[in-house]
Image (cartoon, rainbow, N blue to C red):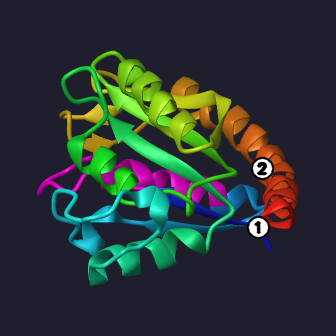
Amino acid sequence: MTKIAIITGSTRPGRINLGVAEWVLEQAKQRGGAEYELVDIADYDLPVLDEGMPAAYGQYEKAHTQKWAEKIAEFDGFIFITGEYNHSVPPALANAITYLNREWANKAAGIVGYGSVMGVRAVEHLRGILSELQVAHVQKQGLFSLFTDFENFSTFKPTELQAASVEPMFEQLLAWTKAMQSVRSEAAIAA
């Protein structure tokens, strides 16, 4: 069974990111096609990157990195939930992604963004990060506005129009996740 992680993008207290991730998980479960799991980066207590070797070497020394690597290695694809901070991705998300390398490679990803301008700048920055790690990110994305999709800027209640934005992302992600399985097989043979 294809496994897709829905990865939170924030660790701060009072975050709205978790509510968006939980909503995306419910949408995913309703549609099926894969096994979905919420992976909350807050559960991994990752400090600012503290590994001595670059992630590309895969020589993880710290227990928190090893635990994080084992979890991410379980999945065939990802949905990243990102808010927009200073026109970019939340620092906790960038840090969590940076800890690993091969665990991300040759897998597919979808992105759900939110913010004052629907998180589009964060989504674009995340695309650059994922490209460097050889993650095939799909073109369609979920986009939500702090002004219309959150009650009192805190409780996620998407409008019908914006809620529908995740459906094309799911369609593309499922197809690409399955296709990337053969890419990983070819890469394993070549290695």
The three-letter code of the residue at mark 2 reads: Leu
Q: Is residue 178 above or below residue 153?
A: below
Q: Position of residue 30 (x, y in %)?
A: 69, 59
Q: Is residue 55 above or below residue 128?
A: below
The answer to which of 60 and 144 lies nearer the viewer is: 60
Q: Label 2 belongs to which residue?
A: 174
The answer to which of 17 and 124 lies nearer the viewer is: 124
Q: Give the residue at x 22% y 43%.
A: 91
The magenta stretch is 7-28
Q: Position of residue 140 (x, y in %)?
A: 65, 27
Going by the image, does 25 lie left or right of 16? right
Label 2 vs label 1: CA separation? 9 Å
Secondary element under disc 2, as helix, strand or loop, is helix
Q: Is residue 126 above or below residue 34?
A: above
- Does 22 appear in magenta? yes
Going by the image, does 154 lie left or right of 30? left
The three-letter code of the residue at mark 1 reads: Thr
Q: Label 1 belongs to which residue?
A: 2
Going by the image, does 97 lie left or right of 186? left
Give yes or no for contact between labels 2 and 1 (Cβ–Cβ under 8 Å): yes
How many numbered tags mark residues here? Answer: 2
The N terminus sits in image quarter? bottom right
Are there few (<14), some (14-19), or many (20+) residues within 10 Å of tag 2? many
Residue 159 appears anywhere in the view: no
The answer to which of 130 and 51 lies nearer the viewer is: 51
